[in-house]
Amino acid sequence: MGKKIFSGVQPTGNLHLGNYLGAIKNFVELNNDNENDCIFCVVDLHAITINQDPKELRNNIRETVATFIASGIDAEKSIIFNQSQVSAHSEAAWILSCTARMGWLNRMTQFKEKAGKDKEKASIGLYSYPVLMAADILLYDSTHVPVGDDQKQHLELCRDIAQKFNNDFNVNDFFKIPEPLIQKEFSRIMSLKDGLKKMSKSELSDLSRINLTDEKDQIINKIKKAKTDPLPMPSNIDELEKRPEAKNLIGIYSSLTGLKLEKIIKDFSGKNFSEFKENLSQALVDKINPISVEIKKLLNEKNYLDKILSEGCKKANDIASRKIKKIHEIVGF
């Protein structure tokens, strides 16, 4: 039996290599497996937990859809929609927030990281958004959710909420308990300027990341300038652990080519970084440049992108509205 897969991407604009290798590449593989039913949601409700420029947000929603399509996700096979257009998400989030417990949310480490020291000034949305994430997943009877390390805790919360709701209302298996889909053979993508910091669009220097809209010359230049250490290429895996920049670049090459780390280390052991960087640049250009060209082309076809969202919203609404109707009956509305 196939998997029912739900995944959400925030429309923050400027998606980069970390987003592609960490999530979108995996989405394409899941989409291509005919056994799977995939729902890819542009989570614009999550995006407004921090201030957004409305015009920019609208553009970013389209850019996220363009990135999905350019990367190889088939809108005919999967549902692609934006969350704000399916009202069941907001409604289910409120109902499930009455099931979720304060103690559970207080344990969420991501809120502590994002709110920082001044958490009194953080929005309630930033605090409670894991409950909305649970609603996103549970409305579609999702069996599996692709998650990175930073979202594992939120999926655990989703599972707790589902189980408590089922128990509280004595409705066994009403909400399916979703399983995490952890990507195999994946190395977390770090900044090209600091191997200890995650690649991020919020880092000031554009040289710290490969954007999915970068052109060939930009990609080659960024890899040429990527930080390394003074030693030659490492000769074994243990050495790699002590050299974060080398580990990051070799991890990127492995994720792009499918080659095992051991094979890459064997091929480049003791050589200069410049030779390895040439190979890495070529692998990046081969993979990212066609996506970049297609994203730019699609961004000029706003009606086409809006049509994908409109059709996806109808399909998503059809599923979610049936589930919310049953939720109403269960809670006594």
Image: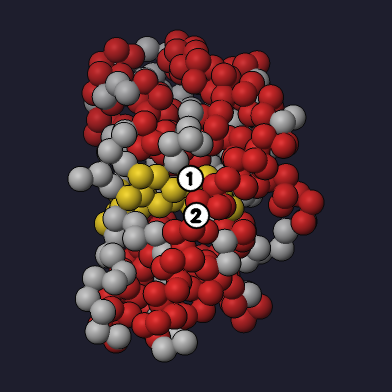
Residue 112 visible within the image = no
Q: Is residue 134 above or below residue 43?
A: below
How far from the left and from the top, in percent, is residue 80? 52, 45
Q: Is residue 236 above or below residue 151?
A: above
| Amino acid on which disc 2 is placed | Ala
Q: Which residue is the site of mark 2? A: 316
Label 1, residues with CA under 10 Å away: few <14, some 14-19, many ≥20: many
In front: 155, or 193?
155
Q: Are marks 2 and 1 in contact (CB under 8 Å)?
A: yes
Residue at 36% in and 68% down: 158
Residue 56 visible within the image = yes
How far from the left and from the top, in percent, is residue 44? 61, 57
Is 189 positioned to the left or the right of 227 in the image?
Answer: left
How far from the left and from the top, in percent, is residue 170? 24, 84
Number of labelled discs? 2
Residue at 26% in and 24% down: 260
Q: Which residue is the site of mark 1? A: 79
Q: Earlier in the sequence, mark 2 or mark 1?
A: 1
How far from the left and from the top, in percent, is residue 262? 24, 23
In front: 98, or 324?
324
Residue at 20% in and 45% down: 1
Q: Is residue 117 above or below residue 52?
A: below
Q: Kindly state the secondary structure of the residue where label 1 is placed.
A: strand
State which quadrant residue 178 falls in. Answer: bottom left
